[in-house]
Amino acid sequence: MQKNEKIRLIDLLMFTIGTALYGWGLVNINIPNHLAEGGITGVTLILRALFGLNPAYTTVLLNIPLILIGWRILGKRALIYTIYGIISLSVWIWIWQKVPVSLGLHHDMFIAGIIAGTIAGAGSGLVYRFGGTTGGTDVLARIFEKNFGIPMGRSLFALDVLVLFSSLIYIDIREMMYTLLASYVFSRFVAITQEGAYAARGVLIMTDKPEEIAMAVFKEMNRGASYFNTEGSYTREPRLTVYVVVSPSELHQLRQLIERIDQRAFTTILNVQETLGEGFTYNRPRKPLLPRKKQ
């Protein structure tokens, strides 16, 4: 396993804590108060309402075909992290069902929606921040992005909307409105915890090792980089500044890469509203398995 593919215990620990928070909110707030969810978790709640199926089991069962379809897209570490996140969430849902906590929020759905969004957003944001995922629509969104050029943010939003509207099978309009409130709070807390869930990120890297960082970004992340000619206001020395655009799921990996090469690098992360081009709205070219021989 390459250096950039190293499995870190701190990541797994954060996934465990994040999925524990998410699972607790799902079992103790969403389910008792009839609040739906987006993505695969929302589908598990629909199956629970219609057929009495336990979300602890359907979370794993629904994700198995998605993992089989998307395992080549995810890469080795992302695949391991995704499988761990799915299993961890399922285990926590099972545990919290065995240890129920009654909060008595039935009289105030507004508070229930706020708390549901807060806990789920904090838990999911923690998982995303450390480079993980709980599978589900994240995997589907990556497949759509790779094969059809649809940006992840759009497909994730569309899939969530589809599942939420399907949830009207077992909840009424009033409960749906509070679900939408929870979804909004969820997105805000994910943004706070993970510095934004779906939009692309532009990264300016002021470093004494621009060539090394740019080459590592290309080799390890298969992303391109650009140079800007800049000048320090104090030293008046000219230097090259590296500019890279990555998806949020790659931000954690880029941070580690920069820290490994130049711990003194000054890095600025920018919110990018829309990114068009290679790697975002159409496929990046595949790198050859074997280097070409020089003529």
Image: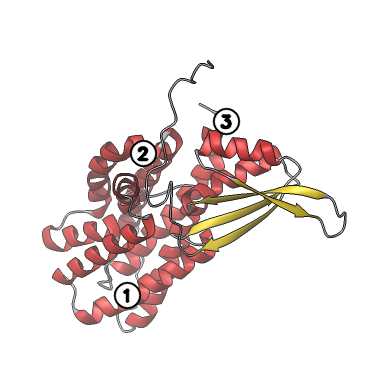
- Counting labels gives 3
- The image quarter containing residue 63 is top left
Q: Is residue 106 above or below residue 59?
A: below
Q: CA distance from mark 3 to mark 1?
A: 41 Å
Q: On screen, 177 above or below 35?
A: below
From the image, tell me which residue sits under label 2: 73
Residue 187 on image: x %, y %: 42, 67
Q: Element type at marker 1?
A: helix
Q: Amino acid at mark 2?
A: Ile
Q: Residue furthest right?
A: 235
Residue under label 3, please give it.
3
Query: Tag 3: residue type?
Result: Lys
**Circle number at residue 24:** none
Q: In the image, is residue 126 above or below residue 287?
A: below
CA gap, disc 3 to disc 2? 19 Å
Left or right, 236 with respect to 193, comes to right
Label 3 secondary element: helix
Residue 100 position within the rendered picture, expressed as x and y whole percent measured from the top left: 33, 62
Nearer-the-camera pick, 267 or 273: 273
